[in-house]
Amino acid sequence: MKIKTKLNLSVGLLFVLIIILTLVSAFYVFAIKKDTANILKANYNTLEYSRNMLTSLDEISSNEEQGIAFFQSNLQKQIANITEVGEDRVTNNLQQNFRQLLKNRKDEKLKSQIRSDIFEIMKLNMNAIKQKSNIAKRTAETANLWIAITGTLCFLIAFNLLVNLPNNIANPIKELTASIQQIANRKYTERVHFTSHNEFGDLAKSFNTMAEKLQEYSTSNLYTLSFEKKRLETLINNMNDPIIGLDEAGTVLFVNEEALKILGMKSEAVVGKVAADLALTNDLMQSLIATPSTKENSHPIPMKIYADGKESYFEKQNVNITITPTGEDQTIAIGDVIILRNITLFKELDFAKTNFIATVSHELKTPISAIKLSLQLLEQEAMGSLNDDQKHLIDSIKDDSQRLLKITGELLELAQVETGNIQLNMEKSNPYKMANYAIEAVKVQAEQKQIELLLDAEKELPNIKADSEKTSWVLINFLTNAIRYSSENSQIVVKLKKENKQICFQVIDKGKGIDKQYKAKVFDKYFQIPGSNKSGTGLGLAISKEFIEAQNGTIGVESELGLGSTFYFKLGVV
C-alpha cells in the first residue's frame, strides 16, 4: 500500500471516530438534559403547589379570605400540572373536599382529609421523581459507557498512528540518508533494502541502480585516475620553478624537488605537515604563506633566496584552487598552490641595464654640458656676428642639447630609483615656496604657448616633511606635461589644499585628458599614451611615483577624455 493511501486512511478513520465521539456525547447529554427537565417541570412544581396549599390551609382559620384565595390559586395550578398515574383521582378528591370545606370552614375532619389528599399527591410525585432520577442515572451511565468505548477506540487508533506512522516514514528516510552519506564518502558498495511496495520501495530501487552505476564507474576509472595522478606528480617534480601545494586547512599536499632545495628540507619532513607549523622553524616557509599585500597598484616584490651556493631572485604567485561540486552552483576553495618563478636571469639583466644606463648617462652629461657652454659662447658678440641661418642652427642645437640633458638626467634618476639608492633630504618644507619655484621654472615654456599659470592655495598651510628638491622636481614634471598637452591661450592651475594631516598638490589642465584604459599605466616606466606627443622618454611619471612613495606619500591622476587632467600627490604635514 502506498504511503499516501496509508496516511489518508489513518487520518480519515481518526476523523470519523472523532465525529462519532462528538455525536454520541451530544446525544446522551441531550437525553440527560431532557430527563432532568421533566423532573423539574412535572414533579418539582407539584411539590411546590402542595407545600403552598398546606401552608394556606392553616391560614384559612385566621385569614380566611386570603388563605382561601391562595389555596384556590395553587389548586388550579396543580389541576393543570397532573402528570402521574392516579394523580388526577387524588386531585379531584382534593377539589371536592375543598368545596365542602368552603361550606363548613370549621370542619376539622375535612381539613384532615384535605391534608391526606395533599400528602397523597406529594407521595405520588416523590415516587415519580425517584423513578425519573433512576432513569437519568441509567442514561448517564450508558452515556459514560459509550463515550468511554468511543474515546478508548480513538485513543488506541491515535496512539497506534503516533507510534507506527512516524517510524514508518522516518526509518526509511534515516536509512536512505545514511546510505547517501556512504555513497558521498565513495563507498559505492552501499545498498538500501526496502521490501515494501510503496514510494520508499521505488526510491530504494532507483538508489541501488545509481549506486551500482557509480561502483562500476569507480572500478573502471581507478587505474586511469591513479595513472593520471602519477603523471601529474612527475610533471610537477620536473618543473624548474619551486611549487608547493596546500589543502584548504593549510596542510602540505605536495612539494617538488626545486622547492625542497630552497627550503633545505626533505620531502617526508614537509608533505602531510601543516605549513604554519613548518613556518615556526623555517623563515622561508613563513614568508611563503604570509598574506600578500592588497595595496592598490602594488607590484609583487621579488624574494631574494640563497640557494645552490648563490643568491637567486623569485617572484611568488599564490594560486587559489576552487571547484564547483557536481549538482551545486557555488564554488568552494580546496587549497592553494604557491609558485616561485625564478627571475634571477631577468634580475641580472636588469642590473646590467641599470648600470649601463647610469654609466652612459653620466658620461653623456659632461659633453652635453660642454656643447651648451660652447653655444652660449657662440651667441656672444665677442665671437663675431651671426646671420639668421646660423642663429637658427644654434637654436636647434641648443634645443636638442637641452632635450638630451633632460633625458640623461631622467635616466640617472631612474638608475637611482632602480638600485634603491634614492638619497632623501627630509626636512621641514614650505609648500608655497615649492609651488612658486616650480611655476617660475616652467614660466618661459608656458609663455611660448601663451598659457597662464595660476596658483590657487589655501591660506596658512602648515609646513610639510619632504625632500624639497625631489618634490619640486615632481611638481615641475607635472607642469611640463600639462604645458605639453594643453592648447595655446589656456590656463593651468596649481592648487594647494589641506586634507586631514596631508597637503595635496594638484596640477589641473584643460587638455585632451586620458582615456580610462590608460589611467592605471601612466606611472609605468617607458609608457606613453598612444597617439600622444613622443618627445618625452616615458620616465618622468614613473620617477615621480618613486620619489613621492619614498617620502611615504601618495600619487595619482583624475582624468576624463576631452575634459583635461588633474595630477596630484599628497605629503604629510610636520
Image (tube, grey):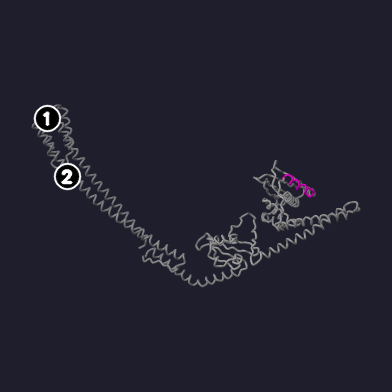
Question: SS at mark 1?
Answer: helix
Q: Amino acid at mark 2?
A: Gln
**Residue 86 at what x, y percent from top left?**
13, 41
**Residue 192 at what x, y percent from top left?**
40, 66
Does residue 396 appear in the picture of this structure? no
Q: Amino acid at mark 1?
A: Leu
Question: Is 439 included in the stretch rendered in magenta?
Answer: yes
Image height of 525 relative to 33, above or below? below
Image height of 466 relative to 353, above or below? above
Q: Nearer the viewer, residue 232 or 266?
A: 266
Image height of 341 relative to 156, above or below? below
In this figure, which residue is indicated by the disc labeled 1?
102
Tell me, for residue 131, which label it has, or none: 2
**Residue 52 at what x, y percent from top left?**
17, 33
Q: Residue at x 87, y 52 (%)?
A: 379
Image quadrant for the C terminus?
A: top right
Question: Is 412 included in the stretch rendered in magenta?
Answer: no
The magenta-colored residue range is: 430-445
